[in-house]
Amino acid sequence: MSDRALAPVGRRRLMASLPLIAFIGLAGLLFARLYAGDASRIPSALIGQPAPALDLPGLDGAPGLADSDLRQGHVTLVNIFASWCQPCHAEHPFLMALAADPELTAKGVTLIGVAQKDSPENIKRFLGAMGDPYAKIGLDADNRAGIDWGVYGVPETFIVRGDGSIAFKQIGPIDAKALQAMVKAETLKATD
């Protein structure tokens, strides 16, 4: 065979392998982006904006959450949680510490909870076993509030200034490091 006869065969093989080469390149790029950066550093478009409306029923007939709960002149921490969420169980002792912190209490900081896609029975069981750090709890059974607040997944915690604007968003569970370095520091900053 001549070189001219081999040229179309080589060209056909190259053309046939282009989709595979493109797929491998795209898969490699997506895989690299999967591990690029810290997901907890994702900025929220809500920082500095008024908190989205809240109108959630309470647990067992208790008062639920409303917009007025976020606009009472003091800082409010809004913790989005669920009893079925394992990271929520891990963060719970740190929420108890936040709720009992004398420095935050003296500044009027309150902690409220939004139970996302959870049943009242499971929430009561969870808080009965672990303790209840929340001044109020709202039930977000259909996740409408979670969508409005831009929640990526539970747990997430928002720091809301007394005027109802969002000052900070913690994505993921609060641990010892995040409690001191970010959440408490940002809460105190929001009280000034």
Image (cartoon, grey):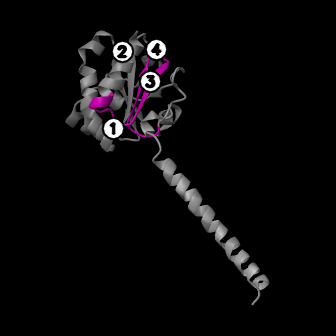
> Are discs 3 and 2 less than 8 Å apart at CB?
no
Q: Is residue 154 magenta?
A: yes
Q: Position of residue 82 (x, y in %)?
A: 35, 39
Crowding at dot 2, Cα within 10 Å, few <14 / some 14-19 / many 20+, comes out as some
Q: Residue furthest front?
A: 3
Q: Which callout, 4 or 1, points at the residue further toward the start of the chain? A: 4
**Where is residue 189 shown, x and y percent of the image?**
39, 14
Residue 147 x, y percent position in the rendering: 51, 36
Query: Of 11 and 18, which appears nearest the observer?
Result: 11
Badge number at residue 71? 4
- CA distance for labels 2 and 1: 32 Å
Q: Whole-Å distance between the Cαs marked 3 and 4?
A: 16 Å
Q: Is residue 178 above or below residue 87?
A: above
Q: Residue beneath label 2, please? A: 188
Residue 134 visible in the shown view: no
The secondary element bearing badge 1 is classed as: helix
Q: Which mark is residue 168?
A: 3
Q: Are marks 4 and 1 in contact (CB under 8 Å)?
A: no
Residue furthest to the bottom in view is 1
Q: Specify which label sits upstream in the sequence, 3 or 1.
A: 1
Task: Specify the amino acid type for callout 2.
Answer: Leu
Q: Of marks 2 and 1, which one's residue comes earlier in the chain?
A: 1
The answer to whether the residue labelled 3 contacts the one labelled 1, judged by CB atoms less than 8 Å apart, is: no
